[in-house]
Amino acid sequence: MRHRRIWPAAAVGFALVAAACASAPEATTTTAPETTTTTVATTTTAPEAAGPPRSPSALEAEAQTSDGTTVTIASVTLPAPGFVAVHAAGDGGPGPVIGVSDLLPEGTSTDVVVTLDTPLEASAAVFPMVHIDMNQNGAYDFAPPDVTTDVPGLGDDDQSVAVTKIEITVEG
């Protein structure tokens, strides 16, 4: 009877060892008289680049008077080609995008004029924000929640978004 009880336990043990060896990638087995050691080879690869860098990005813009169809950004610095998206105010911060610059080159651009798709009808605060052309296709691809490819650029601290609030006085 003892042999019958040992045999099922031995068969299960053998099956577990065989399964472990079969599923382990590049496994090598060394057998000593009473010891079995299994070594599994592992490789570590660097993560693939997710696109161009997002920082350091910066922009400067001041309160201005406009006819409501454009906003002028005094200076924008990009770590890679990208855009300035002008957001309407929403709940005290950036809301929907109401205009986007043409593709800007890496480096510093000055006096960037952004034509608004939705002109301002009255004086209002807007939020110009840097966006990086992450897929490098030259088109602005950011319409949350569905499309968020061209993500906001980050400041020197790699934590904060490069955005500023400016007041636009609409005249005319």
Image (cartoon, grey):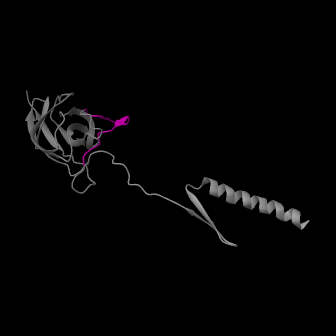
Tell me if 154 is positioned left or right of 1 in this view: left
Tell me if 95 is positioned left or right of 2 in this view: left
Residue 141 x %, y %: 29, 34
Tell me if 33 is positioned left or right of 159 in this view: right
Q: Where 164 falls versus 145 (above or below)?
A: below
Q: Residue at x 68, y 57 (%)?
A: 18
Q: Main secondary structure of the magenta part?
A: loop
Residue 166 falls in image quadrant? top left
Q: Residue at x 19, y 35 (%)?
A: 103
Residue 119 x %, y %: 18, 28
Q: Where 148 falls versus 32 (above or below)?
A: above
Depth order, front residue of 120/144: 144
Q: Name the residue at the right extreme.
A: 1
Residue 48 x %, y %: 36, 49
Q: Residue at x 86, y 64 (%)?
A: 5
Depth order, front residue of 6/75: 6
Quadrant where the image shows the C terminus: top left
Residue 148 falls in image quadrant? top left
Say if the magenta span includes residue 40: no
Quadrant where the image shows the N terminus: bottom right
Point out the stretch of residues depicted in magenta: 139-153
Depth order, front residue of 36/147: 36
Tell me if 85 is positioned left or right of 64 in this view: right
Total count of labels: 0
Q: Residue at x 58, y 61 (%)?
A: 28
Q: Where 97 falls versus 61 (above or below)?
A: above
Depth order, front residue of 89/111: 111
Residue 96 x %, y %: 28, 35
Say if the magenta span includes residue 145: yes
